[in-house]
Image: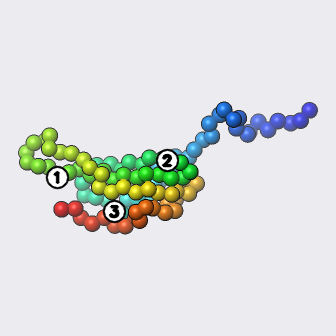
Amino acid sequence: MAKVDQDAPKKDEPVAVPNHTEKIKSQVLEKVGRPPRLHRVEVCRHHDGNYRVNIWEQLESMGDSALSMGVHIRSSYYLKVSDTGEIIRSNPPLTKLGCSA
């Protein structure tokens, strides 16, 4: 009788995909800098080690109304990431953000 390899994933079992979200966030903020009105950094996994990263920023208030506060995407990047979570390349390139007026 042939020995069956019990460790091999079955076809209908999903293969675990590593989650590099926090590592990607920290690398992006280290390279571009932290905007003064940072709202959040959104990391979306696409396919084959590709990720979309959006840096959301709070808008400056327009008067006294709390309703005038909003957020917008300050920068957006499409990344190729290694199996260990290291950024291989970015489109557009990750460069320091200038101050927004």
Kind of residue at badge 3: Gly
For label 3, the crowd category at 10 Å Cα-Cα, with few meaning under 14, some 14 to 19 and many 20 or more, is some
Q: Are marks 2 and 1 in contact (CB under 8 Å)?
A: no
Q: Position of residue 90 (x, y in %)?
A: 45, 61
For label 1, the crowd category at 10 Å Cα-Cα, with few meaning under 14, some 14 to 19 and many 20 or more, is few
- Name the residue that disc number 1 marks: 60
Secondary element at image label 1? loop
For label 2, the crowd category at 10 Å Cα-Cα, with few meaning under 14, some 14 to 19 and many 20 or more, is few
Query: For the image shown, how many numbered marks are present on the structure?
Result: 3
Most extreme residue toward the right is 1
Secondary element at image label 3? loop
Q: Position of residue 85 (x, y in %)?
A: 53, 55
Q: Which mark is residue 33?
A: 3
Query: In screen coordinates, is 49 left or right of 71?
Result: right
Q: For the residues carrying marks 1 and 3, which lies nearer the camera in this image?
A: 1
Q: Are marks 1 and 3 in contact (CB under 8 Å)?
A: no
Q: Which mark is residue 46?
A: 2
